[in-house]
Image: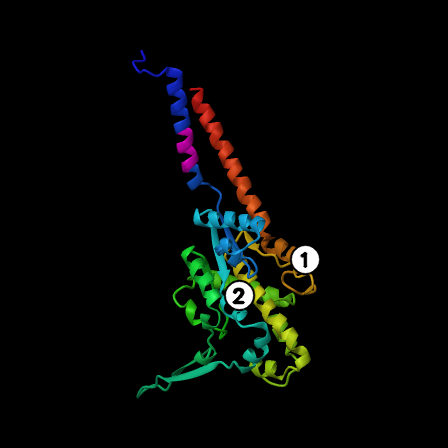
Amino acid sequence: MNNSKYPLDLLLKVITVSVESIVLSVNYQNWNFKMKIMFDTNVWQKVVFPEDYENKEETKCFEIINEAIRDGRITPYLSETIFTLELIRREERHQFFGDVVSKITVEDKSTSEIVGGIITTGPDPKDFVSFDKDPILKKYFSKAIRLDFKIVKFPRCGGIRNTGLEGNLMTIDDATRARMCEVEEQIFKKGGGFFWIEDLIKNCDSSNIANKIKQLPASERTKAEKAVAEWSDGDSVACCIALGCDYFCTRDTANSAGGNSILSQENLIRFDKEYGFKTIKPEKLMDCILKQKTTQVNKTHSQVGAWETL
């Protein structure tokens, strides 16, 4: 017998609505929808700070992606090259790389019984880059770290270092590191990534890459700028594949780069077939998020409807 002053059917409706709200809340935070996304240079800043951009239609797209990252539905990755290679202004790349020389140190480990030592090669501290030249980029980087973006470094010998990345690089195990190198080798063989640098300097008379770059005539310097960008893209793709990311989110179609670019249509088809590598535009990524959200909500409503019939 109902001793309440409210009708039984009204109480049941209140209970149903309450249960539905609880289930929707729980499922919103615990979707099975999880994706690993590597973001390219041309999209990551908008994902990090969508409110900084005036295009309202575009802003909504990046707000939805940003929300999915904050909710844990997307694990975001960035290549370290965004903050090293691409931090160097295009018009300065020819001179910068022409001046870079690896630093070699020799440490004597000889004893009274054994003669030996350790030879170490790596970037010279004078060639380190920093966020000092680009405080705006530092602002975006700091926000990316707060959003738990994983900064991934390709295991290249020597290379350029950014002092601002210290302590923020993702730890990579040996198997993943080996996978990165394996994929990068295939990219190189297909004429993409770092191959552009090697191909550009192949006729220069020197055994040192930096000296070869410095020898390039003025007419070739624009090619050097593009080659560094392609090098960065190649490292990003190798990291993306090795980490098992679902997509490389980019707006770069490499239409003007020719068939050898890692992001050319020909290579995209090839690397999709060989590694399952796929690119996705931000708008399509937004559609995936919204579609999964709608699917999950519909499932939740079905569950609630089943409870109502009990």
Quadrant that contains the N terminus: top left
Task: Count the numbered circles shown.
Answer: 2
User: In the structure shown, which secondary structural element does the residue marked by tag 2 occupy?
Assistant: helix
First to last magenta residue range? 19-26
* In the image, residue 14 above or below residue 32: above
In the image, what residue occupies the spot 56% across and 67% down?
232
**Within the image, what quadrant is residue 277 found in?**
bottom right
Is 162 left, or right, of 248 in this rendering?
A: left
Q: In the image, residue 218 lies at what x, y percent?
A: 66, 81
User: Mark 2: which amino acid?
Assistant: Cys
In the image, what residue occupies the spot 60% across and 85% down?
206
Task: Tell me the crowding category of disc 2: few under 14, some 14 to 19, or many 20 or more residues within 10 angstroms, Cα based.
Answer: some
Q: In the image, residue 101 lies at what x, y percent?
A: 51, 82
User: Mark 1: which amino acid?
Assistant: Gln
- Magenta stretch secondary structure, dominant: helix
Quadrant that contains the C terminus: top left
For the residue pair 307 and 194, the one nearer the viewer reads as 307
Residue 275 appears in the rendering: yes
Is 36 left, or right, of 258 in this rendering?
A: left
Task: Tell me the crowding category of disc 1: few under 14, some 14 to 19, or many 20 or more residues within 10 angstroms, Cα based.
Answer: some
Q: Which residue is disc 1 drawn over?
A: 265
Q: In the image, residue 41 lies at what x, y percent?
A: 55, 61
Closer to us: mark 1 or mark 2? 1
* In the image, residue 115 above or below residue 44: below
Mark 1 or mark 2: whose residue is earlier in sequence: 2
Q: Which residue is disc 2 drawn over?
A: 181
Give the farthest residue toward the front: 54
